[in-house]
Image (tube, helix red, strand yellow):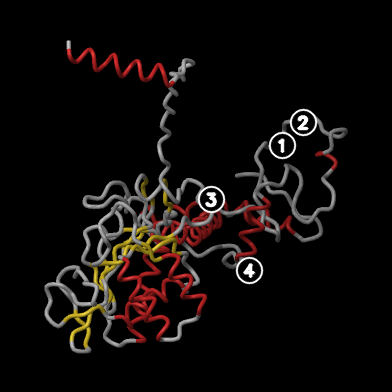
Amino acid sequence: MLDAIPLPGRGGGSRNASREESGASSVGRAMAPFMGREPPAPEVQGAGPPSGDDIVNDLSSAFVPRGLTRGTADPPDRCRPDTMTTDRSRPSGRAITWPRGGPLTTQEFVKTLGAIAALALVTVVPSLAYAKNAPARKERAVSIGSPSEGKLVGGKKIAASPTLRVVGEHPWGLPGLVDMLTRSADRVAKQHPGAVLTVADLSKKGGGDVDGHRSHESGRDADVGFYLSKKGKGFLAPHFATIAEDGRAKGFAGVHFDDAKNWALIESWLTDPRSNVLMIFAAKHIEARLLAYAVASGAPPALRARAAEVLIQPHGALPHDNHFHVRLACPRGQADCRTYAQRPKVAARPKAPRSSTRLTASATVDHKAHSRAKKHR
C-alpha cells in the first residue's frame, strides 16, 4: 500500500489510518465483479462518490511533488535541498490524495479513469463526427488564359429552371457568368411572364477546346438563344432560329424576333451590379433592331451608348444572326486571365537593299531599243 501524506490541520491522519486498514477490502471490492460476486459496501464512512471538483483535484494532486500535499503553503523541510537526507527507510511511493486527505482507493481510482474517458468521449467524438460530415471546401473558380487559348478551374454548372432551359453540351462557366444568366432569365420573366431563356454552350468542365467554337475555353463565354414570339406569345424553337432583316425567324412560320424581351435581356446584362460584360456578339441588323427599340421605349441615353459599345459583329466570323454570344471581362484579382489572345510575333522581313545606280532617260530608251532588236533576231 502506498504511503499516505497527511494534510495539515484537516484531521487527515486518522482517516489515512482507517483507509490503510481497509486497503485489502478496497482491492477486494474492485476485483469482486471478476470473481462472480457482488462487492461489499464501502467501509469508509462519510466519503461519498467523488464529484467533478474532486476528480480535478485528484488529477492535479497526482502531480504534487513528494512530500507536498494540496493546501500547504510551503514544502516540508525534507523537500528542501538543504534538509534532504539519504534516509531510504521511508517507502519511495507517492500517494494520490483527496483534498480532504487520504490516498485513493482502487475503486476511486477506477472512477477517476472512467471520468477522464467520459470527458474524452464528450469532447473528441463530436469533433470527429463534425470533421466527417463537414461540407467539402469549395475550390476557387479561376479563368486562366484567353477565351481562345485557356482553361477553367473550379467552374460552376448552370442549371435549368422554370425561366431557363439548357440545350448545350458544355454547361460550365465562371460563377459570375452562370449567376448572371440565371438572374437575367428571372428578371426578364418577371417583366414578361412566361418568358424562358435558352442557353446553349458555355465551356467544358475544365475548359479548353470546344468543338464548333473558336473560343469558349476559359469559362467567360456563353451562347444564348433569342427570345421568339408567335402571335404575341412566347415560342421555344427546337434549335437556334436564324433571324432575317425584317425580324422573321427563318424556317418557322409566323415566328418573329421579340424586340421587347431581347432588349430586356440586354438591359439586364448591362445593368447587373455583380457582372462586367465585355462584349455581346450579334449581327448588324440585330444590333440595329435592339437600339431602335431602346430609343422607342425611352431607354436612358447612357444605357443605349453602352449597348452600342458592346454589341458587335466580330470580324472574319459568320454573322451572329441566330443567337447572342456574351462574354465577361476577366474577374478582378485573377492575374492569369487574359482578355484577348496574344498574337504571335512575326519576324520582320529584311528590306531589300536599294540600288545606287539610277537609270537616266537615255539609258531607258537604249534599253527598250535593245529589247526590241533582240526580239527580231
**Label 4, label 2: how far apart the Cα atoms are:** 36 Å
Q: Distance of mark 2 from mark 3, alpha carbons?
A: 28 Å
Residue type (three-letter) at the residue carrying disc 2: Asp
Image quarter hosting the C terminus = top left
Q: Which mark is residue 90?
A: 1
Residue matched to label 3: 24
> Of marks 4 and 3, which one's residue comes earlier in the chain?
3
The relative height of residue 80 versus residue 348 in the rendered view (above or below) is below
Q: Earlier in the sequence, mark 2 or mark 3?
A: 3
Label 2 with label 1: CB-CB less than 8 Å: yes
Residue tagged by mark 2? 87
Residue 235 x/y as whole percent? 19, 81
Q: Residue at x 22, y 89 (%)?
A: 232
- Which numbered disc flags the more N-terminal residue, 4 or 2? 4
Q: Position of residue 375 (x, y in %)?
A: 19, 15
- Which residue is the site of mark 4? 46
Q: State the image coordinates of residue 216 (x, y, percent, origin top left).
A: 32, 54
**Label 4 secondary element:** loop
Question: Crowding at label 2, few (<14), some or many (≥20) Cα neighbours within 10 Å?
Answer: few
Q: Given the image, on which type of amino acid does mark 3 rest?
A: Ala
Whether tag 4 and tag 1 are in contact, CB under 8 A, the answer is no
> Which mark's residue is nearer the viewer, 2 or 3?
2
Quadrant position of the N terminus in the picture:
top right
**Foreground residue among 301 and 342:** 301
Pair 1/3: label in front? 1
Mark 4 or mark 1: name the one nearer the start of the chain. 4
